[in-house]
Image: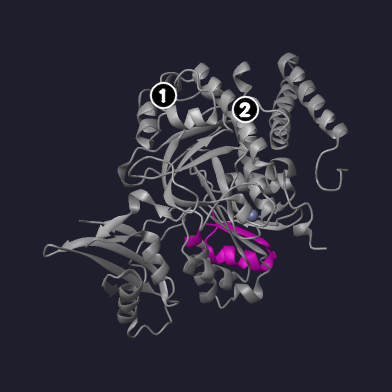
Amino acid sequence: MDRSTLHKFWNPVTETMPRADLADWQWRKLERALARAKAGSPFWAARIPDGISSLKDYAERMPILRKADLIAAEAEAPPYGTLPSTDPSLGIRYHQTSGTSGNTPLRTFDTARDWAWAVDMWCTALHGAGIRPGQRACVAFGYGLFIGFWGMQDALMRMGCQIYPTGAMDSKTRVQLLVDKKIEVLASTPTYALRLLDTAREMGIDLARDGSLKRVIASAEPMSAATRRTITEGFGAPITDIAGMTELGTIFMFECLSGSPHIIENNYIEEVLDPETGRPVEYGERGVRVTTGLGREGIQVFRYWTEDVVIKRPWSECGCGRSWDWYAGGIIGRHDDMRKIRGIPVTPVLIEDVVRTFPEVFEFQSVLRTVRGLDGILIRVEPHTGFGVTGLDERIRAEVKRKIGLQPEVELVGPGILPRFEAKAVRFHDER
Amino acid sequence: MTNGDGFLTERHRQDLVDCYEKLHGLAATCDVPAVRAAARAAIAEVHAALDGQAIEFEYYSHRWENR
Ligand SMILES: [Zn+2]
């Protein structure tokens, strides 16, 4: 018997709970979470309305939390200000967001209890992706202040997998290790997975043929369908999309073996709201994720506006047996990344989905800009070395026009011109 | 062993709850650094299992201090 289907669930009780029981369990946890926040955090004590009596009441009366609110609360007395619900000196880990483009980073800590929970969320996802004790795993990750795959590292160890740490290795050494050590599980951002494939190609290694990978875990960035296909074919292994947030301290969503990205609903309350009206949308309708984390005692978040664009589907539409709702296509994009050019909506993933269908493309960047009073897109493309690129710019231009409805300018650039990313890739710039 | 379908038996459920309570007792009263550290680390792990099985759930670290 294939071991990956034996004991299908990490926690059978909570993963298959009838929906009414799940709501009761969420409410029981939420009541305790609100009580802890009121007792321990001046920020939350001033913000949580009195007498919240049900999940419905909570969704109606609890104010929405924005990232700026968290940053402001921490700024009152750095590093954590008025936010913590539990004494930060009980924290055993510190993490922060990258704080790119001059933004203040969001700082966070975990108590031992919080971290054990965070790791258990990863175990839920990895077990659900068919990963089992004894497998050899490599997390291609920088192991710095960004929380990234830290939880996955500990989860693999907790599950009894064997970790091959590659923190300071360059891409060539990592590719060689994948082959030599017969690594079965690889985790990285989608961007870095593409880089490894490119490095392998330069080394004359076909990882689908020469490697032993059984599963690729992709996280920390939204992924286009084209990128997904390239990674799956390149490594010769299926891919599992997992999403988390520094604000929540760990992951909140993972893809089951049937391909549905489930919300870990015994630990999160996830609402999907219309960004214009702030009202909940129906199943199948596009909206913005608003999340409540139930797992943490140090830094808590209630009704956090994530900017993630999602489409929620009911649990019953996935056949895997979990009673958890899921997000069709995972995180589709970011609401604050949505731009309009001459009335046409454009997002980074939309462009990526077209550009990545061209195997010649190694790296790219899109720039929204105004030329002689007219808004337009410039796509800079760095092709792989060794590919013929005659007419590539024309073909990309035509395909973007066909799929998105806008004619971009396409500029081919030489090797090493565009920035490289290991963590959160930023390929989309609005210079208007 | 489990019931076969991956659910806990009543006996295992009780053992898990008893472990958790005993560990809390140790963490609260034992002053030997190595033992207290082991108890606290184990509590965090056992709590994750209790939570995942929808048996028990609490925020407890505020009852502690770093000594
Ligand atoms: Zn499923």
Q: Secondary structure at mark 2?
A: helix
Amino acid type, residue under disc 1 in the picture: Gly
In this rendering, position of residue A399 left or right of residue A59: left
The quarter in which the C terminus of chain A is drawn is bottom left
Q: Measured along the vertical axis of the image, is residue A389 above or below residue A330? A: below
Write the residue at 42% across / 67% down.
A353
Callout 1 environment at 10 Å: few (<14), some (14 to 19), or many (20+)? some
Q: Which residue is mark 1?
A: A81
Residue A252 is left or right of residue A380, and the answer is right
Residue A346 seen: yes
Tally the marks.
2
**Badge 2 density bin: few <14, some 14–19, many ≥20, Cα 10 Å:** some
Between A210 and A337, the one nearer to me in the picture: A337
Looking at the rendering, which quadrant does residue A154 occupy? top right
Asked if A420 appears above or below B5 in the picture, the reply is below
In contact (CB < 8 Å): disc 2 and disc 1: no
| Magenta stretch: includes residue A186 | yes
Residue name at image x 39 percent, y 68 percent: A363
Magenta run includes residue B39: no
Residue A116, given in percent of the width and then of the height, sits at: 65, 36
Q: Quadrant of residue A129?
A: bottom right
Measuring from the top left, give residue A220's x and y in whole percent: 49, 52
**Residue A223: x, y in percent?**
48, 60
Q: Chain of mark 1?
A: A
Residue ranking furthest to the left: A372
Q: Which residue is mark 2?
A: A28
Q: Quadrant of ligand 1?
A: bottom right
The magenta segment: A168-191
